[in-house]
Image: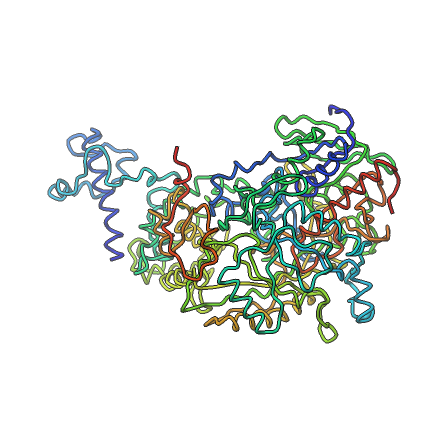
Amino acid sequence: MADQDKKDPLLEKRTSRRSFLKNSGLTVGGLIVGGAVGTLIGKETNETKTTEDTNQAPTPQGTGNANPNAALMFFTPNQFDITNAAVERIFPADDNGPGAQDLLVAYFIDHQLASGWGTNAKEYMSGPFYPGEETQGYQSSLNRQEIFTVGLEAIEKHSTEKYEKSFLELSGEEQDAVLTDLQDGNVEMKGVSSNYFFNLLRSTTIEGVYADPLYGGNANMAGWEMKKYPGHQMSYFNMIEQEEFEEIAPKSLSSQHNH
Amino acid sequence: MATTLPKTDVVLIGVGWTGGILAAELTKKGYQVVGLERGKGRKTSDFIMVHDELRYALRYDLMQDLSKETVTFRNNEKMRALPMRQYGSFLLGTDVGGSGVHWNGQTWRFLPYDFQIRSMTEERYGKNKIPEDMLLQDWGITYDELEPYFDQFEQMAGISGEENPHGGPRSNPYPTGPMKHTPVMSLFKEACENLGYKPFTQPSANLSESYTNPDGIARAACQYCGFCERFGCEYGAKADPTVTVLPVAESTGKFDLRTHSNVVEILHEGNRATGVRFIDTQSGEEFIQPAEVVAVTSYVLNNVRLLLQSGMGKPYDPKTGTGVIGKNYAYQNMCASTTGFFEEREFNVYAGAGSLGMCVDEFNGDNFDHSDLNFLHGANIFLGQLGKRPIQNNAVKPDTPSWGAKFKEESVKYQNRSISFNAQGASMPFRYHYLDLDPTYKDAFGNPLLRMTYDFKEQDNEMSKFMASKTEEIMKEMGASEVIVAREKGPYNIVPYQSTHNTGGVIMGDDPNTSALNNYLQMWDYENVFVPGASAFPHNSGYNPTGTVGALSYRCAEGIDLYLKNGGSLV
């Protein structure tokens, strides 16, 4: 189930890029002219499989994804893909409900990194820098954008060293082994320990599952539904004393802010 | 070149609880008061979108911007102090209302024992009970002398409570009744009663009912929305300076509140302050505000820093044991964190309020015999139903990994099936725990940061183990299928959040050699400078500090009035 889910978004991306090329006139006689668009496609387009194309091609207007928030503000597509795979291992789909991928957690993380939090805007980032004791907390000069960049590179490098494959091509168990090495501080990284990066990845995953959907994750409030958390409610005054558990349909902040 | 403003009767440095109380009381008495707040204004309508766990609880939206100013920290003098670059152990408030806007509202009176802690400990256990490097001191005021001011604060805020069977005597009952009891609270109450304790509802600044205070301020009851600590209250139900004392000050027409006004120096000549120098943070302009009285009413840490920076009072030197500014820094021994898992029941724990809880006080203060124990004082054991928000609550059983399929399954299952409580322990002052100015790191204006030297000691660890045995017993009595208890304390680590109850540094007492203030919070060295706040605490008790801070602020207001009428040192 998980592998199938992993492939479909990629398929959607391939076909949407193909239709973009067809419609934009960037190709001359079927050959890619070059530049960023060419690298974006990779080698698939040169192996034209026309029957597949016409069956899967979305409408000329847009992609299959109707959520305008599901686009990238910071990550490169490759960084997104690695993050997306990693967060699904941290918080997988199961009988309780969707996993991090379907909850759009990787988009949440992308958007958070693009914000002031990603550049540690309200944190004390002046030197001099010294390593410090464990009790003195974070003392690196790297901000979270830089930590993620270095960390995602480390994930990929470690996968290649351990399994001779990209993280994206590993089985679930193999991905778990890579992440465990990261968590145990056994992956070499510049600037911060791999354990620090792993903890950051884990905590932002949980944030992405359960933050108000305003931020891009917790898609359709499905994160809250799993925990039977009612989200933003005005009052529990009339029910807080009652013995029986009450399941209340969750509301997001946007329900407060409709003008 | 600084612009000098017209002289005022009183200038306040910071407009939170202490500044707000002084503003209301002194303007009511007819004095002109200028309140200088470095941050921006705040009002209830700012909090329409406040039920946002990410923004307020995790991204600290209402807190001080650390990129502009933070503190440096080390456990002891062998370490190099380094900046607290990110929030962790404690959260620094800012803006009008300060931390009074985003506190939980747990409101206590310290015990009679606290105010005469040295005398009473020596009397009961002998002088040798107190470790040589523990700077235990009497406060220079007794509980009975402070009682009317506790009452004043509680009446103003509308505190909803039930009398503490172990607390000091009260002249009046709580102005509003206790908050509602939830099934979780009832379960805790029953278990405590079975064990022979006397549990009671936690005293709360979240109103249990609509209330109009003696100043005529009317506020609505708490809705138990579950977004209290780190959040502002969109109902005005949580007592907060912006909805209680500041409107009173404004209505007199004698209060001049200036926001974006960062005080960088207290000006003084001889043994008097002449006023303050501040910077308008929006324009960059410098101003001098002359005043008859200067009230240092910012947060604990900033009170100390400003006095040191302005060269006022004798800085504390731990090597010689002389000096007072920066002495007796203490914190809070949050310990014995206990989690119980319940297989059969689901609780409506998404609902709650900041001070919605049940407490037992049998093991606080000197309420129990310490003859055979290796620690002094104690802790309040309290179960709080604050509202269990989903990002920060992911309790799993001890052997469960912190991520992956099993983690997800358990954290989801136990969201509404686990209960936690802990013990809020007193914090004793030690010779080598202190505050001074950092030699290396500076704030955005180029001024030195405050340096904090602090660690947990055997005192804290022994208390923790003792309390853990009690909390574990209670949780088992509650019927939890599995119980996890944190028994021991490691070194003080600035990373995990514990409490924003920093205390000490400008302490009150009866002796100018060992304290900075008399019992009107008036500086011994500068008779027209008053410093109310938890910075005045010679130690911290086993309770939240705000109730006692409030009482001291009302006492201080009376002192300022006496001083402005008669002059001189009041004690």
Vertical order, A74 against B394 (above or below): above
- Compared across the picture, whether A161 is left or right of B373 comes to left
Q: Which quarter of the picture shows residue B245?
A: top right
Quarter of the figure that contains the C terminus of chain A: top left
The answer to whether A171 is drawn above or below residue A253 in the figure is below
**Which residue is farthest left?**
A51
Q: Quadrant of the N terminus of chain A?
A: bottom left
Q: Residue furthest bottom?
A: B372
Q: Position of residue B379 (x, y in %)?
A: 65, 64
**Front-most of residues B301 and A179:** B301
Where residue B539 appears, as percent x and y from the top left, is: 73, 57
- Look at 43% across and 64% down and name the residue there: B417
Q: Is residue B302 above or below residue A189?
A: above
B121 sits to left or right of A151:
right
Query: For this rendering, which residue is in front, B170 or A204?
Result: B170
Left or right, B369 with respect to A4, comes to right
B10 relative position to B235: left or right: right
Q: Nearer the viewer, residue A246 or B310?
A: A246
Tell me which corner region of the image, top left, top right, bottom left or bottom right, holds residue B554.
top right
Nearer to me, B71 or A159? B71
Asked whether residue B540 is in view, the answer is: yes
**Residue B529 in picture, x, y percent from top left:** 80, 40
Q: Can you see residue A125?
A: no
Dividing the picture into quadrants, the one containing residue B277 is: top right
The mark total stands at 0
Residue B232 image position (x, y, % from top left) = 55, 43
